[in-house]
Amino acid sequence: MNFIELTNEQRRQLIDAQQAFAAWRPASFELEGLGSLVWHTSKGRRYLYEKHFKVQKSLGRETPELVRKKTAHDAKRKALEPRVKQLSKRLDQMSAVNRALNLGRVPRTTARILRALDREGLLGSHLIVAGTNALYAYESVTGTIISSEHVATTDADLVWDNSQSLLLAATGVKRAGIMGILRSVDPTFTADYGLNATNDQGYIVDLLCPDTDDLQRMNEKSDLYATPMVGIQWLLQAPKLEQIVIGEDGLPLHIVVPEPRTFAVHKLWVSQRGDRQPLKRPRDVAQSRVVGELVQKYLRKPFLIKDMPWLPNDLKSNLKHFKKTISSE
């Protein structure tokens, strides 16, 4: 069996956890983004400083306007802090139940990486999740658990929309590029000639991007570069699916993946490419089929050209074949 449906108890718990996280996430991000405003006195005069993590800058000498700014800022923090604290406590309390009910699906390393990317504001705006880890989003939206043979993985495929710059100055990323974010999650991550990152447990992170002539460069000092791949742009052109899923630690996280029909069609197309590794082709086909089945059974979305205008012409022309393969046993 490719998947099983969640029980009513699992559904209730998942919905409760998703609702709590949906309330916690924007409040937590807003609180983190506020930073701190602190007065410093120098030579008998007060100056207001803004602190974000280890970065501090002066906003100038005390003025009525800066006094009002700090008063409003402190009031906002005072309102947010107890809300975030209470919601965090609730999520922590729910985590044990989530694990007991087998809702903790996303591997720990994957979950930690996605949380870090989400905090940096990159997930969904600059990066989406592809590959095997996308299946956790399709589970969540359909209320199912996919068989472990289809989701077990020790890597993560991140797709970079290279129309968006990943340069630190452009995005406001606080750490030293993608590798810096990965190392904040696990200091053992190292770059393999800049093409992917691997930690000491053998977990691999691939950064993929469309194969275009106008490829933007990453930060020149960064040690991780995007690998251009033919056909990857189709995943970016498709609508995005955003879901709240549960990590193995029992805590929820935000994930952004391609629209599931596009994922299924693209996976099958990848399996048919002459340069695809033979060992990976059967898994590609199996994942294509299981996602296609979930789409048709639970989301009830047909694989019709008129309903998928974002698909490229070469996939549209072969959609009948794709539908037949995806739906076959």
Image (cartoon, helix red, strand yellow):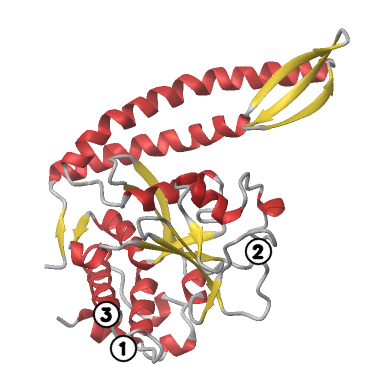
Quadrant housing residue 279:
bottom left
In the image, residue 38 above or below residue 226:
above
Q: Confirm or deny contact between disc 3 and disc 2 (CB under 8 A).
A: no
Residue drawn at x 35%, y 56% is 201
Q: Nearer the viewer, residue 135 or 57?
A: 57
Q: Quadrant of the N terminus?
A: bottom left
In the image, residue 91 above or below residue 78:
below
Q: Nearer the viewer, residue 46 or 19?
A: 46
Q: Secondary structure at mark 1?
A: helix
Q: Nearer the viewer, mark 3 or mark 2?
A: 2
Which residue position holds label 3? Answer: 285
Cα distance between the residues tagged 3 and 2 = 33 Å
Labels 1 and 3: the sequence-earlier one: 3
155 horizontally vs 313: left or right: left
Can you give x and y, in whole percent of width and height, for residue 136 in the image? 30, 57
Which residue position holds label 1? Answer: 320
Q: Secondary structure at mark 3?
A: helix
Labels 2 and 1: the sequence-earlier one: 2
Can you give x and y, in whole percent of width and height, for residue 258 in the image? 42, 66
Labels 3 and 2: the sequence-earlier one: 2
Cα distance between the residues tagged 1 and 3 = 16 Å
Q: Nearer the viewer, mark 2 or mark 1?
A: 2
Q: Residue furthest top?
A: 44
Dot 3 surroundings within 10 Å: few (below 14), some, or many (20 or more)?
A: many
Q: Amino acid at mark 3?
A: Val
Q: Secondary structure at mark 2?
A: loop
Q: Nearer the viewer, mark 1 or mark 3?
A: 3
Which residue position holds label 2? Answer: 218
